[in-house]
Image: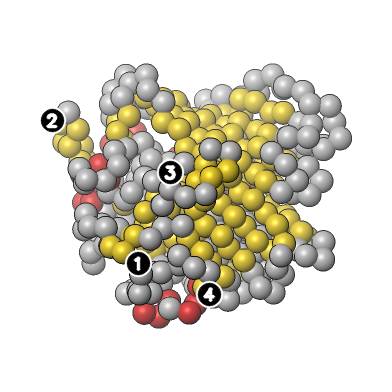
Amino acid sequence: MILFSDTAKETKQPAMSTAADAKAEQFELDNGTIRVTLTNYGAAIISLYVPDKHGKVADVVLGFDSIEAYVKDNAPYFGCIVGRVANRIKQGKFNLNRVEYTLPINNGPNSLHGGNKGFDKVVWGVVERKDGEQPSITFKYESHDGEEGYPGDVIVTATYILTSSKTMRLDMEAVPKNKTTPINLAQHTYWNLAGHNSGNVLEHLVQISGSQITPVDENSIPTGELLPVKGTAFDFTSEKKVGSSIREVPGLGYDHNYVLDSGEKKEGLKHVAKVKDPSSSRVLNLWSDSPGVQFYTANYVNGVAGKGGAVYEKHSGLCLETQGFPNAINQPNFPSIVVLPGDKYKHSMLFEFSAE
């Protein structure tokens, strides 16, 4: 494990490992207030410790004790970056430049989160580390032409950086080398601000800066419409409890893409959501430059053996996966996720922690 000291002089470390020779390891970023443990397996967040209003620190993300558990079976996608295309692609098919591509089917009739072996199930290289007041780590993965059915070679990087005592930023970039391809990365951390082992999040208060959702069919594929949330169970435009309307949602809970409004901004990123745990007063504000966010309430987490003997059940965490819209590659009216060779896909997230 590598510790990044908040007192050390900031230094730029030499390149460490490429994905070709990398092995799955743990790394730690610590600025004295936020402490996050990561692994280059899936570029995942394993733990993230932040204080409550009394200064009491807790780990607020769901996960496993060992890297081996992530490698063996991270079925819920705890903490990882998913791709080449996050979320669902209808029937695992799309047409691009008059070629039909077929992807692995791994979620009902659809292809989910990049297929059977998406970016969450590979070892990324560690190409840069910095310590000092803004400790950071950069992971890199080279995805090859035909991998999980997708066209072209793509170089992907993800940089986690503790930008202040209250903030962590994630910058994701991807550059296709030789073919046009869809790219849509998402960070799949499950949050429980009361502590990862504290039970369900139904009492958490959530506000989402999205006044529309992309409604879905019986297979969780968007219909192509944009549905105003006002007056529905999906309305989080004002702060409300996760559990207040969850039983009115078809299925087991929330698993829907919100169309983000262009409102308040920070560091060039628009506000996505605010989450507050009333018991600890911990608050997470999320900012991003993506067009949408998937709000997911851990509907399919069922008896998962997690960290420190915790057993995670349904609604034990919530995900705010900023993203392009689901199945956008097959919906011409959705923002495009197609990236041309040499162009750069960019997706940033800012996680701001506080207590109130």
Mark 4 residue element: strand
Of residue 348 and residue 28, the one placed in the foreground of this image is 348
Identify the amino acid type marked 1. Val
Mark before the other along the chain sequence, 3 or 4: 4
Q: Which residue is drawn at 53% across and 38% down?
A: 268
Q: Estimate the spatial distance between the alpha carbons at disc 2 and disc 1, rounded to whole Å.
A: 36 Å
Residue 290's disc is 3
> Viewer-nearest of labels 3 and 2?
3
The residue singled out by tag 4 in the image is: 241
| Image quadrant in which the N terminus is located | top right
Q: Name the residue under label 1.
A: 229
Element type where label 3 sits in the image: loop
**Residue at (53% x, 75% y) in the render:** 241
Q: How crowded is mark 2: few (under 14 residues within 10 Å), some or many (20 or more)?
A: few
Q: Mark 2 points at which residue?
A: 98
Relative to 167, 5 lies left or right: right
> In the drawing, does residue 28 fall left or right of residue 139?
right
